[in-house]
Image (cartoon, rainbow, N blue to C red):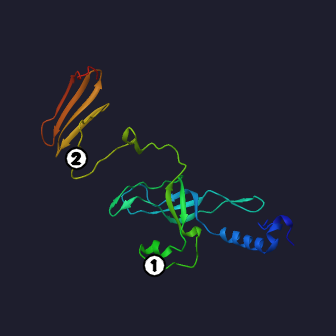
Amino acid sequence: MASDKEIPTGQQKPSSTWGEFNNIAFMVQQAIGKLQTATLVKIEKCTNAGGLEPVGFVDVTPLVNQLDAAGNPTPHVTIFNVPYFRLQGGKNAIIIDPEPGDIGVAVFASRDITKVKATKAQANPGSFRQYSFADGLYLGGMLNGTPTQYVQFNQDGITICSPNVVKLDAPLVTVIADKFQIHATTAWSWDVAGFGEQWKYTGGVTWEHRTWQQGGFVTNISNPINPPDGTP
C-alpha cells in the first residue's frame, strides 16, 4: 500500500465541492490549465548558425516550472523542432539566428501544425490536439544581455557596430550624403580589378604608401605626412 508521501497533492480544495458553482469553476479551471498560450523559453539548439539558408528550427525548454498544489516544482522537458521567427518578405530577409542560451518568447498554436511544418502549405491538422506544447512557435529574444554586434537606432542617428567585419556585397553600392568621412586608426585600402592602393599608419607622423597591380609595378614608400589639423 502506498504511503501518503507517495500520493501527489491535487489542486482540489475543500471549497471546490461547496455547491454547483464551485464544482463547475474547478473543472473549468483544470481545463484552462491544459491550454498552452505563451511562455518564456531557453534555446537549447538551433539548426542554423547565421549562414545563408532557409529559416530553420530550434529546440527550447520552458523556463517556468510546473507546480503541484503543495508547491513542489517539476521542470519542463525540452520541446524539439520548433519553427522560429525571421523577419522576411519574399526573398528579402534579416538573418539573425537564435543561439543556445538565448531567452525568448514561444507561443503555441490552437491546432496541430505538424503537416504545415512538413509541407509549408495549407493542410489539415495532424491530430485533434489543441493548444499543445508540441505546436510551439519561437518569436524571438527577451531578457537577454548587452549585445556586442548590433544595429542601433536612436535620436543621434543609426549605428552599425561589429567586433569583426561589416561587409557590403552588391553589384553597386551608392552613398548619398552632404559629407562623407572615413576614419581609420591603422590603414585603409582599395582596389579595382587587381589594381589597388593602401595607406598604412606606422607611428608618429609617418605612413606607408603602397600601390599594386597584378603583373605590374609595386611601390613601397614611407613618408611623413601632416594632416590638415596637424595631428596624425
Whole-percent x, y for residue 189 in the image: 23, 37
**Residue 151 at what x, y percent from top left?**
39, 45
**Label 2: which secondary element:** loop
Please state, as top left, top right, bottom left or bottom right, where the N terminus lies in the image.
Answer: bottom right
Q: Residue at the spot x=21%, y=40% of the render?
A: 190
Query: In the rendered view, would you say 183 is above or below 136?
Result: above
Q: Is residue 137 left or right of residue 16?
A: left
- Which residue appears farthest toward the left when viewing the image? 216
Residue indicated by mark 1: 123
Label 2 crowding class (10 Å Cα cut-off): few <14, some 14-19, many 20+?
Answer: few
At label 1, the amino acid type is Ala
Residue displayed at 54% across by 63% down: 107
Question: Residue 101: image x %, image y %?
Answer: 54, 52
Label 2 vs 1, first from the N-terminus:
1
- Image position of 178 (left or right of 61): left
Please provide percent x and percent y for residue 105: 54, 57
- Quadrant assignment, res 120: bottom left
Residue at 39% of width from left, 63% of height from top? 54
* Amino acid type shown at disc 2: Thr
Residue at figure coordinates x 49%, y 53% from the top left: 99
Q: Which mark is residue 174?
A: 2
